[in-house]
Image (spheres, rainbow, N blue to C red):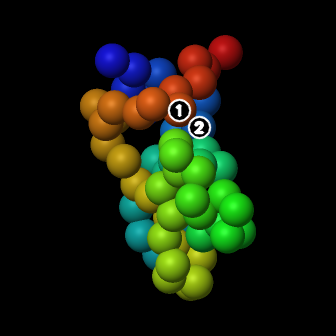
Amino acid sequence: MNYCETCAFWKLEKYPTINARNVCSCQKLCECSEEEAFADDALTYSYDESGSFYPGPKFGCVHHKEKE
């Protein structure tokens, strides 16, 4: 199993008013177009307020891309 802590999509974001946290930047997790929304390997949400996914370091992922 591949985990977020070793994935290139897992990136630290810093904010002025809250603690920094890691966000998943994989394009398969998004508010996507209709074509992408029904892709077999996508997770699509319909909440158009710039939502993000904040998985923990041991979260497993099928779209893992090894960090360089």
Q: Give the CA distance from mark 1 to mark 2.
A: 9 Å
Instruction: Inspect the image, locate mark 1, and give the three-letter code of the amino acid beneath it.
Output: His
Q: What residue is at 34 percent from the left and 32 percent from the top?
A: 60
Q: Position of residue 57 (x, y in %)?
A: 34, 34
Does label 1 or label 2 sit earlier along the sequence?
A: 2
Instruction: Inspect the image, locate mark 2, and give the three-letter code of the amino acid beneath it.
Output: Phe
Relative to 61, 7 lies left or right: right
Q: Is residue 16 visible?
A: no
Quadrant in the picture for residue 18: bottom left
Q: Mark 1, residues whose alpha carbon is within 10 Å: few (<14), some, or many (≥20)?
A: some
Instruction: Name the image quarter holding the N terminus.
Output: top left
Q: Are marks 1 and 2 in contact (CB under 8 Å)?
A: yes
Q: What residue is at 38 percent from the left and 26 percent from the top?
A: 3
Residue named by callout 2? 9
Q: Secondary structure at mark 2?
A: loop
Residue 15, compared with residue 20, is above or below; it is below
Residue named by callout 1? 63
Relative to 2, 35 lies left or right: right
Q: Secondary structure at mark 1?
A: loop
Which label sits on residue 33? none
